[in-house]
Image (cartoon, helix red, strand yellow):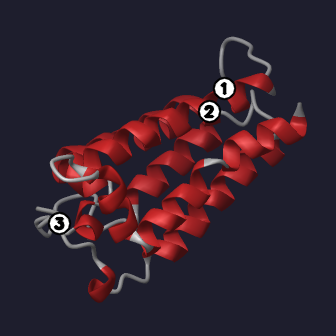
């Protein structure tokens, strides 16, 4: 079960890497008239389900959670909600890579926390340490750290051109 869980946890990161580096291929795959950010959101939600099922398969739950669970989980989810609230679906799901104009945002948490969507997700994962073996949390966090590194290098010349 451990190897299958690890594969499930890592499953979305090659997809995100491909989208970030070759967005035009995704736009073409989605086809004319389909929003590549919306389609990416659907695929990303499927991968997130695979990740959660993988994590649940190696977890052991007990109640109540430790004291650190609530602040870490609450602040992590707040950051994720705030990023989505400020950027919307196109901003959250690589819209800028698919040729969309995403407004520059400086409101909290942007300008205060670098990569707040990943920081929020990492905090939420760390909140679950009492239920999930450390190596699976670490694996997921390393996937996020990898994506932070990948997304830190954005070449505007590689952005996709919209299909008409």
Residues at discs 1 and 3 in contact (Cβ within 8 Å): no
Relative to 54, 162 lies left or right: left
Which callout, 2 or 3, points to the residue nearer the camera?
3
Q: Which mark is residue 27?
A: none
Q: How far across and how far down the image is residue 8, in percent?
A: 70, 40
Q: Quadrant of residue 64?
A: top right
Of marks 1 and 3, which one's residue comes earlier in the chain? 1
Residue indicated by mark 2? 50
- In the rendered image, the quadrant that contains the N terminus is top right
In this rendering, is residue 137 above or below 150?
above
Residue at 43 percent across and 78 percent down: it is 152
Q: How far separated are the C-alphas under marks 2 and 1?
A: 5 Å
Residue at 16 percent across and 61 percent down: it is 107
Residue indicated by mark 3? 162
Label 3 crowd (10 A; few <14 / some 14-19 / many >=20): some
The local secondary structure at tag 3 comes to loop
The local secondary structure at tag 2 comes to helix
Which callout, 1 or 3, points to the residue nearer the camera?
3
Of marks 2 and 3, which one's residue comes earlier in the chain? 2
Q: How far across and how far down the image is residue 102, in percent?
A: 14, 64
Residues at discs 2 and 1 in contact (Cβ within 8 Å): yes
In this rendering, is residue 65 above or below 85?
above
- In the rendered image, the quadrant that contains the C terminus is bottom left
Of residues 3 and 30, the one drawn nearer to the viewer in this rendering: 30
The local secondary structure at tag 1 comes to helix
- The answer to whether one can see residue 7 in this image is yes
In this rendering, is residue 127 above or below 26?
above
Relative to 148, 80 lies left or right: left
Q: How far separated are the C-alphas under marks 2 and 3?
A: 30 Å
């Amino acid at each position: 079960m451990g190897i299958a869980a690890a594969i499930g946890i890592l499953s979305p990161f090659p997809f995100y890497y491909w989208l970030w580096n070759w967005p035009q291929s995704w736009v073409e795959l989605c086809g004319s008239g389909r929003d590549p950010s919306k389609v990416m959101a659907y695929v990303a939600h499927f991968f997130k389900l695979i990740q959660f099922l993988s994590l649940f398969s190696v977890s052991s739950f007990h109640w109540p959670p430790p004291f650190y669970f609530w602040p870490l989980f609450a602040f992590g989810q707040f950051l994720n909600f705030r990023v989505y609230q400020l950027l919307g679906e196109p901003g959250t799901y690589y819209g800028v890579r698919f040729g969309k104009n995403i407004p520059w945002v400086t409101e909290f948490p942007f300008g205060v926390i670098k990569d707040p969507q990943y920081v929020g997700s990492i905090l939420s994962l760390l909140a679950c340490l009492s239920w999930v073996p450390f190596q699976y949390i670490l694996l997921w966090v390393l996937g996020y750290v990898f994506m932070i590194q990948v997304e830190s290098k954005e070449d505007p010349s590689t952005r996709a051109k919209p299909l008409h």
